[in-house]
Image (cartoon, rainbow, N blue to C red):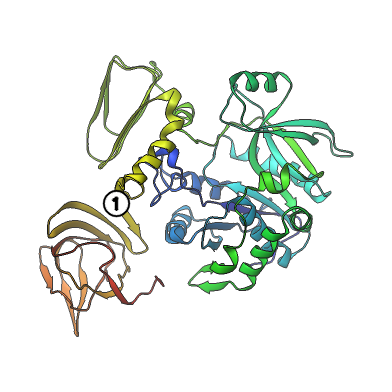
Amino acid sequence: MTETNRDLILPVILCGGSGTRLWPASRESMPKQFTRLVDAESSTFQATAKRVTDAAVFSRPIVIASSEARFIVAEQLLEAEVPADIVLEPSRQDSAAAVAVAALTAARRDPEAVVLILAADHVIGDAPAFAAAARIAASGARNGHIMTLGIEPTRAASDYGYVRPGPTLDGLPGLHAVERFVEKPDAAGAERLIAEGALWNSGYFLFRADIMLAELEAYVPEILAAARAALDAATTDLDFVRLDAAAFAQAPKTSIDYAVMERTVHAGVLPVSFPWSDVGTWDAVWQVLDRDAQGNAVRGRVELVGTSNSLIHSEGEGLTTVVGLDDVVVVATPDAVLVASKSRSGEVKELVTTLRKKAYPEADAHRRMYRPWGWYQRIDIGERFQVKRIMVTPGGRLSLQKHFHRAEHWVVVKGTAEVTLNEQIILVHENEAVYLPIGSMHRLTNPGKIPLELIEVQVGSYTGEDDIIRVEDIYGR
């Protein structure tokens, strides 16, 4: 990892959440921060990464992500043309553990390095204003304060936490001590807080590494000890830093807000007014999207009649139509549909919990599953067979593997496939096929310069993903 310049801010992007309130577009296999919910051209994670590329303000960012999302993170950073260091969490221990890892990593470069903690799933309407605010708040961090950005409210939101600013910090005009943090209030409480001058708690934190480490040691030493042990025993895997799983799992699960921010005497806040949303619900997504004259925000193939103030999100080739509804959310994906009142869209999280209890695979898995080499999408499944569409990126290579319960037929529809079949290497061109018997050792590679697409037909007594015996894998799975 690169050395830091003390005049620059070290951005650390946390992107370990699952975003279940935005189901079915956001699922465990592709959480909301990696989907294009707001911008058709980029995910919120990519937008966040681009937001910290001003070399006059920020140093090379660090991304802390789940191990399962590592190749999605790497691919999206490459698409966004943002170089970054990637640290992998082996389990979800909440934000306090992640912040501890960030502070320790920064301190090993420079104990007084200023760190900026960012969430990967927020939408900000003015990137230059954000960078300017970070630079101002960093002055407070360099003076020993743990700063947060407080968003000036535009509505009485009961789905956000609040921060009440106190007196101005000595010698730091525009920066305030934090009087107290307030949990998500009810509607009346939100109105009262705003009247008293409270700000939305953005969840962005700036601090000197040594200051945060001292506070973690004072308030949650067990989290700091677990993070330190996990980092000390970390290994390098391809371009990733893997934290030690056993050590990291010892960190109690709690947020940095509870662990430090609500207890420290060093908390400070900078009031800011740029457009901001954590897009935590479908209602919040509707609020940040462009809307037509009837107040509707639409995405994809959609037709409406007599509908107003609604969000209609349609994925894939299907046509979604809505007649005579107001204030609703309709989300249509190839394998699941959500219809909800906009005001109760936050309850989608409880819906997903129910789906999991009933073992619906759609609760967590998308029909299209992304892999480091590309993706596959189920087309059909039945007793003793399954049909998939597979895309392999140029240079992509699947693992060398075999199956005990199924045979496979591969039909190339685009590009050229290099197929390893036991001791043979076969080139399979468009409109050609190859048969892989049960138990055969096989591998698929795209040696070309265009994406390889093929149809896979599996036939056998069992077609589950766990009937894969990997013998060799360049991606370390």
Residue 225, picture quadrant:
bottom right
Q: Position of residue 264 (x, y in %)?
A: 78, 45
User: Measuring 49% from the left and 72% from the top, which residue is drawn there?
Assistant: 237
Residue 174, picture quadrant:
top right
- Amino acid under label 1? Arg
Label 1: element kind? strand
Is residue 244 in view from this perspective?
no
Residue furthest bottom in the image: 423
Number of marks drawn? 1
Quarter of the image that includes the N terminus:
bottom right
Q: Is residue 11 left or right of residue 290?
A: right
Q: Position of residue 70 (x, y in %)?
A: 46, 61
Residue picked out by circle 1: 368
User: Measuring 53% from the left and 62% from the top, which residue is drawn there?
Assistant: 88
Q: Is residue 208 above or below residue 340?
A: below
Residue furthest front in the image: 357
Work out whether residue 47 or residue 402 is closer to the camera in this orientation and state it: 402
Q: Is residue 442 above or below residue 131?
A: below
Crowd tier of the residue under label 1, counting other residues whose Cα lies within 10 Å: few below 14, some 14–19, many 20 or above: some
Q: Is residue 79 left or right of residue 162?
A: left
User: Measuring 64% from the left and 72% from the top, which residue is drawn there?
Assistant: 232
Work out whether residue 76 or residue 229 is closer to the camera in this orientation and state it: 229
Is residue 372 in view from this perspective?
yes
Quarter of the image that includes the C terminus:
bottom left
Q: Position of residue 240 (x, y in %)?
A: 52, 67
Work out whether residue 182 or residue 10 is closer to the camera in this orientation and state it: 182
Work out whether residue 3 or residue 312 is closer to the camera in this orientation and state it: 312
Q: Is residue 432 above or below residue 351?
A: below
Q: Is residue 326 left or right of residue 147?
A: left
Q: Position of residue 402 (x, y in %)?
A: 23, 75
Residue furthest right in the image: 170
